[in-house]
Image: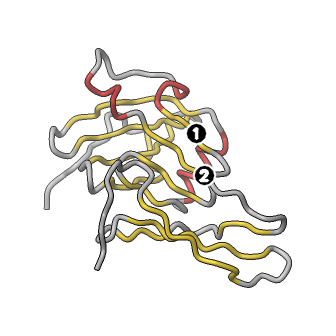
Amino acid sequence: MSIVFDLDSLHEKIISFNVDQGQNKLIILTNFEDEKRFKIYDMTKKLIEIESVLEFKPLIGRLESGLYTFVDGHIYYNNNVIKIRYDLFNSYGNTYKENEIFDYYFDIFELSPGERVKAKTPLDSTKSHRLAYIVSNKESYSTQKIILMPYLHENKIYLNK
């Protein structure tokens, strides 16, 4: 057993975490005196690369719920993507404001009225570098379609058999 991350304070509690296996980074949401803190820990370098206080309630709720897919610095959930600005990590300092770390992309797909992307999607297929979004109809509660998308963060073309 090895310790990957250790909190600095006895009063700080880990609420949730997730691993970006492609970049070998750990995102951690903590609570310290009613303040939500977001940290990114690089498991290769064994240091906290970035830390910020979070105030945007939808982001806090999403991180607390764990209902998202985390791949190469992108948080995919429902019909939305949040990009974490990994490019900032090599610059001076590691304290940034929330609006400097995250780029938000809402309503990726044009959905028909009554359609919505299911909460526990997208499903990640690391082997084929694709995400599967399950779209259902709000009125009939039935699965209408499955949308397969290549990773939005990759600029590659994968040819399958």
| Circle 2 residue | 80
Horizontal and vertical percent position of residue 85:
41, 33
Tags 2 and 1 in contact by the CB under 8 Å rule? Answer: yes
| Circle 1 residue | 104
Q: Residues within 10 Å of mark 2 (few under 14, many from 20)?
A: some
Say whether residue 6 is left or right of residue 38: left
Q: Which image quadrant for residue 124?
A: bottom left
- At label 2, the amino acid type is Asn
Say whether residue 2 is left or right of residue 101: left
In the displayed structure, 109 sits above or below 130; it is above
- At label 1, the amino acid type is Tyr
Horizontal and vertical percent position of residue 155:
35, 48
In the displayed structure, 10 sits above or below 109; it is above
Q: CA distance from mark 2 to mark 1?
A: 8 Å
What residue is drawn where x is 65% and y is 70%? 118
For marks 2 and 1 on the same chain, the one whose residue lies earlier in the sequence? 2
Q: Residues within 10 Å of mark 1 (few under 14, many from 20)?
A: few
